[in-house]
Structure formats: structure tokens, C-alpha cells
Image: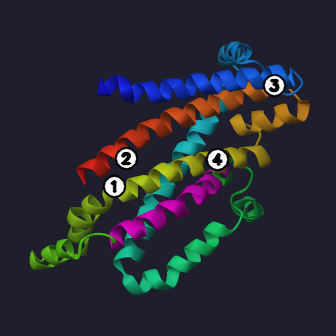
Amino acid sequence: MSGQASWRGPVLMVVGLFVLWQALYWIVGEVALRSPLDTIRHTAALFARPSFWPHVVESARAFAAAIVIAVVLGMAVGLALGFGRLAGQVFEPMLVALYSVPKVTLYPILLLTFGLGISAKIAFGALHGFIPIALFTINAVRNVRPILIKTGRVLNFDTRELVWRILIPAALPEIFSGIRIGLSLTLIGTLLGEMFASQRGLGYMLMNAIGLHNVDVIMSITFVLVVFAAVVSSLLLAVDRRLHRRA
């Protein structure tokens, strides 16, 4: 019964969203929307086009590289600032201030630095995800029970052993929460990078479709991105909850 209850909520939510989508389509009409059935049909036709897959591969490569950079850099900075109290007091306000800055204003600088290729999209995506991961990691390290740190020092752990054997395992649930949020923001940043200055990728296709007022392509790409983000976020949320229960 508990397994059925866990699935009942998401299924009802999906059904409710499709009902709302259909109702909006009836109200707005085909000027700005397509029905759920038409969108699914056009999405299937889009996946059948050979010309569509290079854009998917381009976005997947950029997103994968951006999330790896965001996670590695965010955890490294977060561990350093969380473990080093003085460094955290100095640099954490800078991270918070940078997080409040609209990232679009920094995109021209990234374009001048990395050019119009995939590197700029990776950098823009990583910039979106790096800061929340770093901030969550800082707070996670600070919330580790002091007795664990003292135990590591009693066992004569050096800094590397203290980080890998005590800090990361103890702070992992909160760090993973930051990774889950950072993944969504990294996806948004990567797509924005493709929309503003790119000649390939799903973001480029979406911006091109907006310029041509191709509602079919707009709805299909949006549908693909929403489904991907929802599935990945649900899986990460399930892992996140399990980690917090174990903690």
C-alpha cells in the first residue's frame, strides 16, 4: 500500500498538468499553444528527423561538461571555505553577492573569453550551478558535528583523510541537495547560452523557432526539456530523501 501511495501523488499531478494544459489550449487556441496530443505527435516526428540529433548531442555534451565542472569546483570551494573558517568569512559574502547578480550580464564577458563555441555554453552553465553547490557545501561542512572532527584529529588524520573519511560522508546529504539544485540551474544556464550565441543545440533550435513563430517546434522542445528535467529531478530527489533518512 505504501508503494502505491508513493506513486499515486506523481501520477495525479501529471494527469492534472495534462488536463490544465488541454484546458489552456481550448482557451488560447492554436495561436500560442498546441494540445498535448499534437505536441506528443510532433515530438515523435522531431525525434525521427536525422537533423535533430546533432542538436541533442551538442546540448548533452555541453550540459554534461558544465555539471561536472560545477560539481567538482563547487564542492572543492565549498569544502575549502567551510573547513577554513577565516576563508569562509571572507569569501562567502562574495559568493552570495555573485549569486545575486543576473548571470546574463556576465555572458558578454564569457563570450569574449571563450568565443562562440561550446566552451562559452559550458562556462555559462557551470557558472549557474557552481555557486549554489558551493554554498550548500559550505553550510553542510559547518553543520558537521564537532565530535567527528575531534575524532579525526585524535586518529591523526591529515587534512586529505579528514575531508574524504569524515567531512564528505557526514555532509553528503546536504551536499547532494545542493547538487540537485545546481543541476537544474546548470541546465538552464546551458540552454540560455545556446539561445544567445550558438549555432547548434536545443536552445538554438528554441530561439530560432521563436523567431519564426513555429509553435510546433517551440512546444515540442519545451516538452522534451520539461520531461527530462522532471525525470532527473525526481530521481535525484528520491536519492536525496534516502540520504537524509540514513543521516
> Quick one: SS at disc 1?
helix
Does 142 appear above or below 7?
below
- Badge 3 crowding class, 10 Å Cα cut-off, few under 14, some 14 to 19, many 20 or more, is many
| Circle on res. 33 | 3
Residue at left 75%, top 18%?
35
Check whether the beta carbons of the residues at disc 2 and disc 1 lie within 8 A of each other: yes
> Quick one: SS at disc 4?
helix
State which mark lies toward you, 3 or 4. 3
Q: Which residue is mark 1?
A: 173
Query: Could you tell which of marks 1 and 4 lies nearer the N-terminus?
Result: 1
Does 176 appear above or below 226?
below
Visible in this render: residue 97?
Answer: yes
Q: Gap between marks 2 and 1, in whole Å?
A: 6 Å
Which colour style is shown?
rainbow
| Circle on res. 188 | 4
At label 4, the amino acid type is Ile
- Badge 4 crowding class, 10 Å Cα cut-off, few under 14, some 14 to 19, many 20 or more, is many
At label 2, the amino acid type is Asp
Quarter in which the C terminus is drawn: bottom left
Q: Position of residue 162 (x, y in %)?
A: 22, 70
Q: Which residue is mark 2?
A: 240
Relative placement, left or right, of 104 versus 75 is right
Residues in magenta?
121-142
